[in-house]
Amino acid sequence: MAMADKGKLTIWLETPWVSRAFPFAAYMLFILIQDMVTPLFSEAIASVWLTPVIYAIKIAAVIAVLIYFWRSYDELRMENIEPAKLLWALGAGVFVFVLWINTDWKFATMGNPTVYDPRLIPGNRVYIFIALRLFGASVVVPIFEEIFWRSFILRYIINPDFTRVNIGAFTWASFLISSVLFGLEHYLWLAGIVAGLCYNLLLYKTKHINYCILAHGITNFLLGLYVLFTASWRFW
């Protein structure tokens, strides 16, 4: 019976939508856990210990999930890199960054941002956390978000049997719906929607997820540097 159950679990884990949704779900689960656990501790403990520890565990868990499913991500394999498409990715990443820091308007926000100042962490641990935060935002987040939004959701809207849909296939419904959903995931919802539109357009132009991952990573890396140099913690 145990072997049969294990077989069913393996089959479920090998389902295409599971491998593309699981890393995103794991990340969101840790955000939920942090929101539930943080009020149980004092502000000092939450700032100095809880937030950085949960973030480290979250990134480690998502990396582990991505590694587990990595062989199933056929859409990430590419034969060659085209310089022109790299320039499109660079341009898209910079454009979304500039957009992001200039659309902090009240009507274009949703809820309250999570403002966390890592300088509260004492000693050298603050530099370790900042490095991890930059790595998580610039590398890990772009990989699992682009796999989820541009590879899974965008194609699923076209056809629930999404693996039959080519990467970069266009329909107005998938283009607009996926962009809006992507935007609603963020505090700056308007900037998020435009970012979703921009990354979708990049996908249509390049026909490959990796350029979207690169653009998303550039956006997040520049945003991280901006936050660190200006102490605009609401963007992080």
Image (cartoon, grey):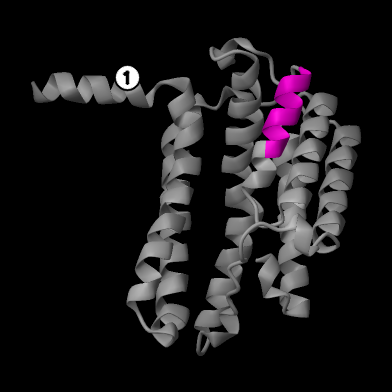
Q: Quadrant of the C terminus?
A: bottom right
Q: Residues within 10 Å of mark 1 (few under 14, many from 20)?
A: few
Q: Residue furthest left?
A: 1
**Which part of the image, by quadrant, shows the N terminus?**
top left
The quarter holding residue 45 reads bottom left
Find numbered disc 1 in the image and state the secondary structure of the residue it sits on. Answer: helix
From the viewer's perspective, is residue 66 above or below residue 200? below
Q: Is residue 215 visible?
A: yes
State the residue position of label 1: 11
Q: Position of residue 7 (x, y in %)?
A: 22, 20
Number of numbered discs? 1
What x and y, as percent, mark residue 141? 59, 49
Residue closer to the observer: 145 or 140? 145
Specify start and end residues of the magenta stretch as a single range. 171-180
Q: Is residue 173 left or right of residue 151?
A: right
Looking at the image, is 125 positioned above or below residue 140?
below
- The verdict on residue 66 being magenta is no
- Label 1 amino acid? Ile
Residue at position x 77%, y 78% from top? 229
Q: Please, which residue is most extreme toward the front here?
A: 107
- Residue 179 on the magenta segment: yes
Q: Residue at x 45, y 82 (%)?
A: 48
Q: Nearer the viewer, residue 211 or 107?
A: 107
Picture layout, residue 165 above or below residue 154? above
